[in-house]
């Protein structure tokens, strides 16, 4: 699937990795619908990206929001060809705090609700829309790229909920790719390492340098542009399917 002339739906699309993809899709001749909970940034993002962009406010953990937003996205440019699932939250808490209090179960449910169940809901709604597309030359109707994290494999102290959610994303990639093969939709996941996004914007340079030092090579933080570059390659290479690709400069995270 070529990005040029296609329409991408990007959850978490107004910030960080998602916005990096939105920028690249538009720069490469595609159109983009950004679906995000953050309305302020949504308005700014469409001002920045221009006519071939739209914003739809949506909490991916709300079933009603997702159904309405995906329907709205399908109408915006007449269909959805590509879905990038980048919306996510990353709260941290230890299983037992120093004062002995337990991991807050509601925080665990919230994290799974947004990162895993919300993503699943967006995928099922969007797949139903993509299945209506006219197939391309080799029967392709759509491409889905999910965002996990290397925390799916090497979660650090405090990341039990986040790692469980991202491990779920890794685990569902292949079965969803198998399920959707019959309608010509490919499904892949990117597991980024440490990326310089608004999540880290407030961090002091020293912390950023120490995180970059964890990377084996190159010794710098990843960027939204690195991520968007990989996403475009996945979208445009029809042999990549059912795969999880680490984008992490050979990093294996230590316990903390
Ligand atoms: N930055 C990193 O180092 C890193 C590393 C690995 C994985 N990731 C993953 O990449 C994805 C993007 O993260 P980022 O670093 O760009 O962070 P970010 O905070 O810049 O972007 C995340 C976006 O998701 C949106 N969002 C949050 N909850 C939502 C909800 N319920 N419904 C809809 N939108 C919601 C936010 O408003 C925000 O725009 C996340 O899934 C994150 O877990 C990030």
Image: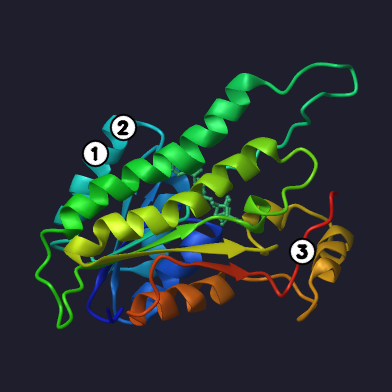
Which residue shows up at 34% across the image and 60% down it?
177
Q: CA distance from mark 1 to mark 2?
A: 6 Å
| Occupied quadrant, residue 60 | top left
Which disc, if any, is residue 63? Answer: 2
User: Is residue 36 left or right of 199 when viewed as pictured?
Assistant: left
User: Is residue 55 left or right of 76 when viewed as pictured?
Assistant: right
Q: Position of residue 101 (x, y in %)?
A: 80, 16
Q: Please report contact status of discs 1 and 2: CB closer than 8 Å, yes or no.
A: yes
Of residue 225 and residue 131, the one placed in the foreground of this image is 131
* First of labels 2, 3 by sequence position: 2
* First of labels 1, 3 by sequence position: 1
Which disc, if any, is residue 204? Answer: none
Q: Which residue is mark 1?
A: 67
Q: Position of residue 129 (x, y in %)?
A: 17, 54
Q: Which residue is mark 3?
A: 252
Mark 1 is surrounded, within 10 Å at the Cα level, by few (under 14), some (14 to 19) or many (20 or more) other residues, namely some
Q: How many marks?
A: 3
Q: Is mark 2 within 8 Å of ligand 1?
A: no
Which residue shows up at 77% across the image and 63% down it?
252
Rendering colour mode: rainbow
Q: CA distance from mark 1 to mark 3?
A: 37 Å
């Amino acid at each position: 699937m070529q990005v040029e002339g296609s329409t991408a739906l990007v959850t978490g699309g107004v910030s960080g990795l998602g916005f990096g993809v939105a920028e690249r899709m538009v720069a490469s001749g595609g159109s983009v619908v950004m679906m995000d909970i953050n309305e302020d940034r949504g308005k700014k993002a469409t001002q920045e990206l221009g006519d071939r962009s739209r914003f739809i406010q949506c909490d991916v953990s709300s079933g009603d929001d997702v159904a309405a937003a995906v329907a709205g996205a399908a109408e915006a440019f007449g269909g959805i060809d590509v879905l990038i699932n980048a919306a996510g939250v990353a709260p941290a808490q230890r299983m037992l705090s120093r004062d002995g209090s337990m991991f807050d179960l509601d925080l665990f449910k919230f994290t799974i609700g947004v990162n895993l169940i919300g993503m699943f809901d967006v995928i099922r709604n969007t797949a139903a829309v993509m299945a209506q597309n006219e197939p391309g030359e080799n029967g392709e109707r759509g491409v889905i790229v999910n965002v996990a994290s290397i925390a799916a494999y090497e979660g650090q102290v405090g990341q039990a909920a986040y790692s469980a959610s991202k491990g779920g994303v890794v685990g569902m990639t292949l079965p969803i790719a198998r399920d959707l093969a019959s309608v010509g939709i490919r499904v892949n996941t990117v597991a980024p390492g440490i990326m310089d996004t608004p999540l880290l914007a407030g961090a002091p340079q020293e912390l950023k340098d120490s995180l970059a030092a964890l990377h084996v090579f190159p010794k710098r933080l990843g960027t939204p542009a690195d991520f968007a570059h990989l996403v475009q390659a996945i979208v445009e290479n029809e042999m990549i399917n059912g795969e999880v690709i680490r984008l992490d400069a050979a990093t294996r995270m230590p316990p903390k």
